[in-house]
Image (cartoon, helix red, strand yellow):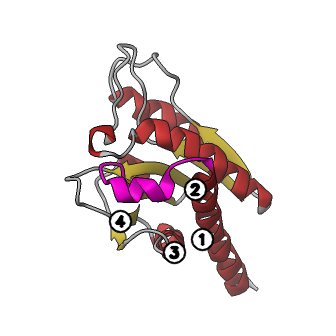
Amino acid sequence: MKIALTVGHSRLKSGCYTSADGTKYGGCHEYKWCRAFSKQVAAQLRKKGHHVDRIVCPERKFISSSQEKIHKLNIINLGRYDLVIELHLNAASPDATGTEVLYRSNAGKKYAAAIQKQLSSVFKNRGIVKRDDLYMLNQTKPPAVLIETFFCTNKNDYKKAKGLANRRKLAKLVATGVQKTVITEKGKEA
């Protein structure tokens, strides 16, 4: 499969980030963590034989977050991808915890469920959620999922995700979820 792997949010021209920062709660910065995590996810998906393009917004180029949307959708919708995966972290009160995967289409729902099953072996299972209001889910030609891997505002969630070894472990889980869906769908076609 050809997969577009995108990092949610960006760093604006002003130096500000458009993402959540949970460091004051003992967590992490969403954009920085997801940017690093995307490298491990891409590597794990490639090990499973997929072509993966990482899409990270250019830093210090955009003036507002609305430019992220245009940048990503142009690449995705012209790229003939089979699947889009966008990486995010949830943010709320410091006691909020867990993982969830968002989707819109029926095809996206299958990937969301398989990825969620894998990630919930590490984090509290918040389930999969159908969302019609997010451009990454409703304006891409291929099916898309948005992974809210954990809460960047929760220090215990972050402990499970901190460092390269933990990112690699989580990336393997994401890739396993994708691969299980691919195998299931190929079995139905045969």
Does residue 122 sit above or below 23 in this rendering? below
On the image, the x and y values in percent for residue 84 come to 55, 53
Q: Nearer the viewer, residue 29 or 126?
A: 29
- Amino acid, disc 4: Gly
Identify the residue shown where x is 72% and y is 79%: 186
Badge 2: how crowded within 10 Å, few (<14), some, or many (20+)?
some
Quick one: label 4, few (<14), some, or many (20+) residues within 10 Å? many
Q: Earlier in the sequence, mark 4 or mark 3?
A: 4
Circles 1 and 4 in contact, beta carbons < 8 Å = no
Residue that label 2 marks: 166
CB within 8 Å, label 4 to label 3: no
Residues at marks 1 and 4, CA–CA distance in whole angstroms: 17 Å
Residue 177 is marked as 1
The numbered disc on residue 110 is 3
| Category of crowding for the residue at label 1, using alpha-carbon neighbours closer than 10 angstroms: few (below 14), some (14–19), many (at least 20) | many
In the image, which residues are magenta? 149-164
Residue annotated with mark 4: 98
Marks 1 and 3, the one that precedes in the sequence = 3
Q: CA distance from mark 4 to mark 2?
A: 16 Å
Residue 128 is one of the magenta-drawn residues: no
Q: Position of residue 126 (x, y in %)?
A: 33, 71
Can residue 91 be seen here? Answer: yes
Mark 3–mark 2 Cα distance, whole angstroms, equals 25 Å
Give the label, 3 or 2, closer to the camera.
Answer: 2
Question: Gap between marks 1 and 3, in whole Å?
Answer: 10 Å
Q: Is residue 129 above or below residue 89?
A: below
Q: Tags 1 and 3 in contact by the CB under 8 Å rule?
A: no
- Residue shown at the point (65%, 76%) measured from the top left: 180
